[in-house]
Amino acid sequence: MNNIQEEKLASKTILVTGGAGFIGSNLCDKLLELNAQVVCLDNFSTGKKKNLEAFEGNENFTLIEGDIRDLDTCKEACKGVDYILHEAALGSVPRSINDPITSNEVNISGFLNMLVAARDADVKRFVYAASSSTYGDSEKLPKVEEEIGKPLSPYAITKYVNELYADIFHKTYDLDTIGLRYFNVFGRKQDPNGAYAAVIPKFVMQFMEHQSPVINGDGTYSRDFTYIDNVVQMNILALTTDNEKALNQVYNTAVGDRTNLVELTQLLKKYLSKYDSSIGEVEVKHGPNRPGDIPHSLASVEKAKTLLGYEPTHKIAGGLEEAVKWYWDNLK
């Protein structure tokens, strides 16, 4: 499969917005491996320059420091671009609850700027990061793409609006789009620091420092934790698919399996104890449930398998083992 993808992407120019972020930098890495020309647009509000260090001096890599909230910057970044992977966004449900205006400006106005710039530059395909938060208060499990509930946070609203805009830009301006609803992505390069750090890197760092992680609630809330390699695969498939029926759709980007927070901490302890046996003795604490959190998340990935040929390579255990090794090697 790699050879076919390389054939399709070699010498193509691909813009990765948010390319210095956790997911974006992993995508840049893969695209360069496939001999594509990569343009990274990032304002470094959450992205990290160290995530791009490996690409310095690579003649196929170009960095533009700029903000998607500025339309002229978006238009400049889109010049000569064949495809776009739009990852730039302000993530985090709690962040959006604390500051809905900035989340809206980045995630909706910035998204619209990128769509306009893509349209005006005749970009062939616009693949964007959607979110499992779009399922909102729908209690149905597993989540299927065509059935969503009402959003439970400002962040969820912004990501749903992205899907609506993408659909309209296809219908009105004939811009091909694909939305990938990410489910709790984790893995190498994910930042463990800051107020809005995701649960896995945050817990890993706390365990490594022999601090007790705090689970929100009783630990029975469950998620379809998705390793970064699965997400990279979905993005590359979305870029390279020749299946016309696969275009202008949204897809769950997940594993199709769920793990609760108690099970998650047990797995983290198990893999971290290989490096430091005393981590197995670190106590886990419990706090109140977090506003805007959905109790359970589990994706159906049948649509992605059928239309894109997706096959997840990592379930939670294998992904966690690799992620823990990366954190231990890079952050200890």
Image (cartoon, rainbow, N blue to C red):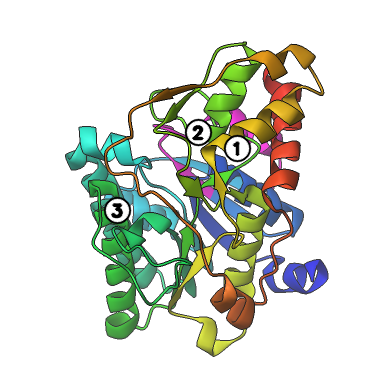
In the structure shown, which secondary structural element does the residue marked by tag 1 occupy? helix
Q: In the image, is residue 203 part of the stretch drawn in magenta?
A: no
Amino acid on which the number 3 mark rests in the picture: Ala
Q: Is residue 175 left or right of residue 35?
A: left
Task: Calculate the distance from the C-alpha at mark 2 to the C-alpha at mark 1.
Answer: 10 Å
Which residue sits at x=62%, y=11%?
210
Amino acid on which the number 2 mark rests in the picture: Val
The residue labelled by disc 1 is 264
Task: Calculate the distance from the C-alpha at mark 2 to the C-alpha at mark 3.
Answer: 18 Å
Q: Nearer the viewer, residue 47 or 290?
A: 290
The residue labelled by disc 3 is 156
Which residue sits at x=38%, y=40%?
66
Magenta-colored span: 40-59
Q: In the image, is residue 43 part of the stretch drawn in magenta?
A: yes
Residue 199 - label: 2
Residue 117 - label: none
In the structure shown, which secondary structural element does the residue marked by tag 3 occupy? helix
Picture coordinates of residue 292, whole percent (x, y): 28, 44
